[in-house]
Image (cartoon, grey):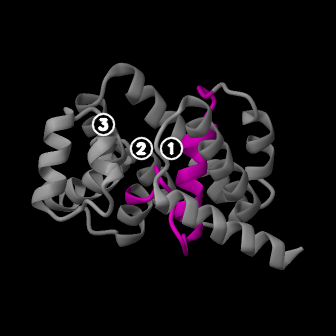
Amino acid sequence: MEADKALEIVRLRLSKKRYQHSRQVADTAVQMAKKFGIDESQAYLAGLLHDYARDLPTVELLEIAEKNHLISHQVEREVPDLLHGPVGALLLEKDLALKDKAILTAIKHHTLGAVGMSDLEKIIFLADMIEPGRSYTGVAELRELALIDLDEAMLLGLESSIEHCLEAGKILHPETIEARNCFLQKVNISE
């Protein structure tokens, strides 16, 4: 898929605010890809398209996820927004014939994280958290770390997400906890 075509699709599909966010994620992903020697065009497209299904109504997200066996845990039925990554990847493949598995997997995992993430997946997960429009306690430290060590940044990013959920009284998804534990082990082994 050409970048110009993807940009137009996202512009027409998403709210103005989410479109701006997606552009900033794409730009941040390219900056990170340059730093870590990852394909910049893949990073740009994945960043731009990562929220493809984010503005779908909850009922539609659940319906698509149920029909296509995308629900991996009951938490997703209780917090359907968590499904926008897997549903987005599915729709991009089905409706727009996007075949790049690396991009689709990065989109699928950008919300919860996963065990065994590729560098592209890590970049999209982190770019979504650190793009210039994001403002929360700890984002400056995460931005710095994301340009130094992807695994350490993933650990910090996942822990930040978990802390946010705990403080807000939100349900934690087991996949995020597993991903955090995986990165904790990775970081501890490399120290």
Magenta run includes residue 128: yes
N-terminal-most mark, 2 or 1: 1
Residue type pointed to by label 2: Leu
The structure residue drawn at horizontal position 76% and vertical position 35%, both measured from the top left corner, is: 138
**Residue located beneath label 1 in the image:** 26
Q: Is mark 2 in CB contact (under 8 Å) with mark 1? A: yes
Any magenta on residue 173?
no
Considering only vertical position in the picture, is 96 above or below 181? above
Position of 7 relative to 152 (above/below) = above
Considering depth in this image, is 134 or 115 the residue closer to the camera? 115
Of the residues shown, which amino acid type is indicated by label 3? Val
Q: Earlier in the sequence, mark 2 or mark 3?
A: 3
Describe the element under mark 3 as helix, strand or loop: helix
Secondary element type, mark 2: helix
Alpha carbon distance from label 2 to label 3? 7 Å
Q: Which residue is mark 3?
A: 10
156 to the left or right of 79: right
- Give residue 76's position: percent from left, percent from top: 32, 50
| Residue 79, label in figure | none
Part of the protein shown in magenta: 108-134
Towards the viewer: 162 or 91: 162
Q: Is residue 28 left or right of residue 95?
A: right
Q: Give coordinates of residue 108: x percent, y percent.
A: 37, 58
Residue 48's disc number: 2
